[in-house]
Image: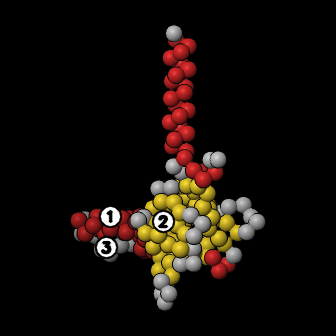
Amino acid sequence: MKLVRIASLILVLLSLSAASVQAQAYLYVERKGEFPDHRWKQGEKLEILISDGEDAFWQKGYFNGGDSAGMVLGTRYYNWSQVLGVRYANGLIPFFGKSAMAAAGLFTGVFAVNSLINDDSPILTEGQIYLGAGLLSAGLISKLFWYKVRKMEKGYELRIINLMELDG
């Protein structure tokens, strides 16, 4: 009896996992013949460069699948000819850069308020100004490296793998 329960539980879990796999689609950005650079699962946030004929703009949304002719971002469908590029966060660099800029404002503000409360002169010492300026400049310089941008004109291409289509 116990063996039957275990077998039925395993069967239910396998069928549930198979059902969830069939609804999955993945978007890959890669150069032809190279290992994929990045992958998004269905439902993950994505930012693509879209051309509407005259202008190009970055569009944010959630990847919701696609086919051989295009992809769905949020609720809108974009043809591959409209997609000029994709960008995504470069690891922890955005986190540390934003933290440095926030720390610059926070430390400088705390030092200034403390000096005003204690009636100190000057309000900020030379070292405090250097600390704030150093943190701010580190954050602003890191901003150049926050995102990896992959443009189609530079040989990158987007490819969708839909696991439901692979299931024979």
The secondary structure type at the circle numbered 2 is strand
Whether residue 86 is visible, yes or no, is no
Residue at the extreme front of the image, as rendered: 168
Badge 2 or badge 1: first in the primary sequence: 2
**Mark 2 to mark 3 CA distance (whole Å):** 54 Å
Q: Which residue is drawn at 51% across and 55% down?
A: 42
Residue that carries the numbered disc 2 in the rendered image: 72
Q: How crowded is mark 1: few (under 14 residues within 10 Å), some or many (20 or more)?
A: few
Q: Residue at x 47, y 76 (%)?
A: 58
What label sits on residue 110 in the rendered view? 1
Residue 142 image point, x, y percent: 54, 71
Q: Is 52 located above or below residue 34 in the figure?
A: below
Q: Is 26 located above or below residue 56 in the figure?
A: above
Foreground of the two, 15 or 139: 15
Q: How crowded is mark 3: few (under 14 residues within 10 Å), some or many (20 or more)?
A: some
Q: Which amino acid does label 1 sit on?
A: Val
